[in-house]
Amino acid sequence: MKFAPLFLLISVAVLIVLPWLVSGSMLNAAVQMLIAALFAMAFGLLCGQAGMLSFGHAAYFGIGAFAAVHAMNAFGGEGLLPTPLLPLVGGATGLVGGLLAGYFSTKRTGVYFAMITLALAELLHALAPHLKTVFGGEAGISSFRMPAWGIGFGGLNDVYFLTLVWTLVCIGLLYLFSKTPLGRLALGLRENAHRLRFLGYNTNALGTLIFAVSAMFAGVAGALQSINIEAANYVVLESHISTAVVLNSYIGGVRVFLGPAIGGAVMTFFGHVTSDLTRVWLLYQGIIFVLVMMFLPRGLMGELVERARNPSAEGVAQTLGTLLMRLASLAIAAFGAVFTIEFLQRLLSPEYRADITEGNWPDITLFSYDWAPLSIAPWAIGLGLFGLGIALATLINRRVAARKEAQA
Amino acid sequence: MSDPILSLQHVHKSFGEAHIIRDVNLDVIPGERHAVIGPNGAGKSTLFHLCSGQFAPSEGRIFLNGKNITGLKPAEVNRHGLARSFQITNIFPGVTVFENLRLAVMRKHNLQFVFWRSAAHLRQVNEEVDDLLTKLRLTDRAQTLASQLSYSEQRSLEIGMTLASDPQVILLDEPMAGMSHEETDYTADLIREITKGRTLLIVEHDMSVVFALAHRISVLVYGEIIATGTPDEIRGNARVKEAYLGEEAA
């Protein structure tokens, strides 16, 4: 834990020099990763700290995005609202929206709270295409980034730095917020709202305020997206945006501070890379979520923090060795699984099935080799490697368990 | 005898046809440790709910420090100087012991919607939390998650949170329920210590605790107080023996 500030410093330094390290396409992905990270952090305040699982956070991301686009068009990036300050509009809109929605939804807890947030978001999503002046109908609303403060904002680098500064500042503010009395009471709300009431607190008002703060930062993230793509379309209100932020936050670890940000960034990066490589990348995303929930229920970051707090008794070298062996065996299993899934995907695709004529099954190209689908080779490689990887992992686990027993 | 700090006058509570509390008159004297005993279903918990504002009485009046608190809400009763613990442990399990007490202490200082100050720098609050930790003998457990405390430590924490608002009157609802002998002794000591200078009203089933701890005892049977007196008077009371203590005395 004592290395945490050092890690943070190095991460920020890397983020600052990133434009000189990576390609334009990768930098574009980095902008999206930052936005997803901030959005997930906003969600994490509500869900991880205050224990309120919202299924409708796309609504606040969305209204922030639209508010920013309207502000861009109204002010032309000048006067009171130059381009760098546009996220303030998104934040203010999110805050107001959050106060309204939070007042109603925090009157209930648990599943009922989740259902109300879902209903409110779906209501907005259903309403949006009909309100053409506000949401621009099917086409959405587009705009242009204007230069301000001597910065052009024409190129990707400027947008990257704008997004980076806002994301870092907002995450910093969220951190400070978690240390204030209100931020501490969020934990009380999560742990035992009934007791808070008997200590004399107004839990509905507390919940509403925390909901609004979360919605405010979601609105900032939405505004950053509008600035990045110079447009907003009502698809940002769709439920899959709400779902993605839930999944990302849980994958990263919703209860540890930077967990949601890591989850948002990692999964956005994953989507960016895999969506070009395979059509079934959403399937992989789902599999990752299920695996993380089954084997690392605290999330990636949560597990890391836990390991750092309670280090294994085996010493660094041994732990690292075990970790590497585990990763290697899992990589073998993952390759086998990916091979099989990709092969099946190609075999079952409509294009391939159209090619089958009179029992003649053409070869399938996968990883630059041609495989006969009716032969044993591709299936043996895929399932065999998967089985081998799992067997190795099991073996390693058994050996670690045996060593621990011997020590005890 | 000084004026009572908590006074119930002709209090009656019924739920539909069920008359749970019947014409109860009870005066609790400032500074005393007053126990309420009685068989299961006698209405002891209901009596506590009436005093702490969870229920309003159907008839009669309740005075706290001479003020009429009949029908006030729990938070309002709390601010008039009466705090209660719960029969079932009611804490914040997933945060540290320190945090549990800080959440309880902050309300007293009116820190609710404050997001411009650091909780770590609230000197007064943190000092009070440290004091409470010392009193509860939980100082070396301050950074432990409340869920990882032993059962009796959790009960101590529960009592500590009741204490956090610095109330004049404390209501403890079966604080020793489910405890071993050592834990019971330990908690009895703790209660004696932390209620110095305050008034205690306690419901407890462990008779050895009640007779050792209480200055006065009231016996509640079927919603009626059949006797109030010192432990010796209660032990010698024929009606009490017949109604309640009989089996133990035999």
Image (spheres, rainbow, N blue to C red):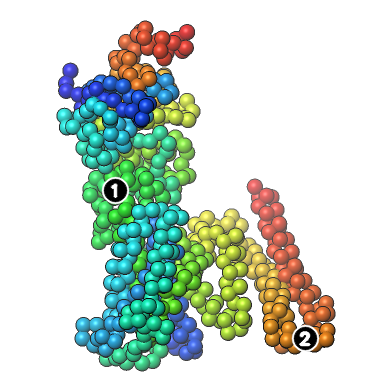
Residue A373 x, y percent position in the rendering: 79, 81
Q: Which mark is residue A356?
A: 2
- Determine if marks 2 and 1 fall on one subunit: yes
**Can residue A274 be seen from the camera position used here?**
yes
Q: Looking at the image, which residue is at 68% across and 54% down?
A: A401
Q: Looking at the image, which residue is at 22% across and 33% down?
A: B70
Q: Decide: is A326 above or below A374.
A: above
Q: Secondary structure at mark 2?
A: loop
Amino acid carrying label 1: it is: Tyr
What residue is pinned by disc 1? A201
Front residue (pair B27, A155): B27
The quadrant of the picture occupied by the N terminus of chain B is top left
Q: Which mark is residue B221?
A: none
Amino acid carrying label 2: it is: Ile
| Mark 1 Cα shell of 10 Å, populated few (<14), some (14-19), many (≥20) | many
Please give the chain letter of the residue carrying mark 2.
A
Q: CA distance from mark 2 to mark 1?
A: 70 Å
Q: Sequence-wise, which precedes: disc 2 or disc 1? A: 1
